[in-house]
Amino acid sequence: MNPFIRCIFSFIVLLLPFSVEAQQLSADDLFLKLRSRLEGVRDYVADVNMTIDVSFMRVPALKGKLYFKHPDKLKLERNGGIAILPRKSVSLTLNNLIPSGRATVIDAGQETVNGIRARIIKVIPETDESDIVLTRIWVDEHRLLALRTETTTRESGTMKMDLRFGKFAHLALPDQITFFVDVKELKLPKGVTMDYDAGGTDMVKKKAAKKSNKGTIRINYLSYKVNTGLSDKIFADPVKE
Amino acid sequence: MMQLIRQELYKTFHRPRTYISFAIIAAIAVIIEVAMIADGRTFVDFALSGVTEQFDLQGNIINGYFVTYIILQSLIVNIPLLVALVAGDAIAGEAGLGTLRLLLTKPVARWQLVISKFAGSLIYTLALLLWLAIIALGLSLFLFGEGDMLNLKSDEVVLLLKDDILWRYLAAFGFAALAMTSVAALAVLLSVFSDNGIGPIISTMGIILFFTIITNLGLPSFELVKPYLLTTHMIGWKGFFSDPVPYDAMRDSALVLCAYTIVFVAAAIIVFNRKDIKS
């Protein structure tokens, strides 16, 4: 190869990474764009299927309507049935896992989440008023969607959530979320509950099986109605009123 | 034989004492239902505190199915005692009144007399359970309506969907009938040994209470004997409110209850056949 052409070629190759870097959003911009996209959804009603996998709960798959209103209202309605949500249920919405005020955003590399390459950003709120201490967000830069979050709060510990997007991706709303929870064992005196333990055989098995203190709540979203102007009354608990 | 059973039923249901059991069941069920209307939320908050500190439960928790379960749970020890009230008096009561010898002057075999006494007690037991079903399940559903049911166990909570509950109650009452039949058989057996009704009634109550305590105390040293105790299997009806239903264990429990019933009735016949009737 001609030495002149080789020199030009080498120069171009050297410049190429800087050119790609220039096209990539900064961590700050990525976070602000993502947050602004999420804030576009002020409320929604979604038909959902919910499965709860917690060691001390035997709950069948629950169908219902999930109501959300910005910033922190969430309610599962099951047509007269009993609805179960984690105590930190408000964290089931992405909006509440992302700091709302001024924040310091740090680039934390890249990782593959559910087969999709994602950029990791760390977000630290600059105000002390926020319950959130730190949020790590795995962002699909191409579609501007959060694929995973890990939020550390002052009062509720660390919460992890995985999100899968499909037909509602254009609304930045997931088709499925998996919320990971830490649970404590449930222990009540047998003299009170008077359990039937089939002559002691179950008890031996139960002692042998160590129960997990990790649980998951998976919600599949079947449909959404977005920004319909939901009333606050929907979120009131009629029993407690 | 049918004539003997008819006479037995006539005697049982014309005795005012028989209806004390029905009144007690009605009183307990109605008091619990009224208490649930007045203060059910406090009770639920207390009972479910282990769950609600981690999960938010919304919806109609205090519904007819839930209240029925609370009533049945409260009556676990009482119902066998009410069964013993009539079955324990079946033969010993006749001896106490001095009518047993007179009864045996009729051309009936002694085993037939024991069987008719047991059959009378069995029909009374079934009537008592039917009354319980009406007053607990029927009235609770009327007052509180249908809904999903939360069943709180010592180490887990089970949520049953409302369309999946009624059959469980029907099956549970069926199983309870089997359990109470064995209690009636025990009371009839004890009744053979005594010449007055109080002894067998108190003995049956004592045995049931003693074994219920052993069954529920949960001490490792009792684990060896638990599978053989009547009281362990008597609460098999609760298995229908588990998910999944432990059918294998419940089949075993049903077989144990049947075996106990057969052994008690057979023993009652053998003892009564050999007994020197003096009154």
Image (cartoon, rainbow, N blue to C red):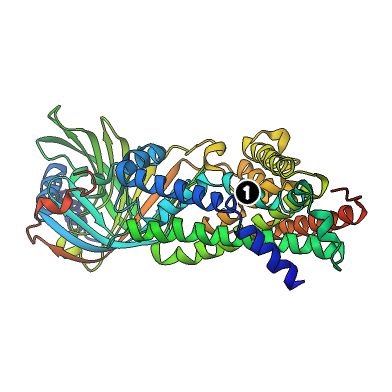
- For residue A234, side relative to residue B61 (left or right): left
Quarter of the image where the N terminus of chain A is located: bottom left
Q: Where is residue B53 in the image (x, y as percent from the top left)?
A: 35, 37
Q: Nearer the viewer, residue B279 or A54?
A: B279
Q: Where is residue B128 in the image (x, y as percent from the top left)?
A: 56, 57
**Residue B70 visible at all:** no
Say above or below: B226 vs A145: above
Say above or below: A19 vs A125: below
Q: Which residue is painted at 56% across and 43% down in the image? A: A194
- For residue B224, side relative to residue A13 (left or right): right
**Residue A117 visible at all:** yes
Q: Mark 1 lies on which chain?
A: B
- For residue A22, side relative to residue B68 (left or right): left
Q: How crowded is mark 1: few (under 14 residues within 10 Å), some or many (20 or more)?
A: many
Q: What secondary structure is found at the residue carrying circle 1? A: helix
Q: Which residue is painted at 75% across and 67% down in the image? A: B4
Q: Which of B133 and B227 is in front in this view?
A: B133
Residue designated by label 1: B80
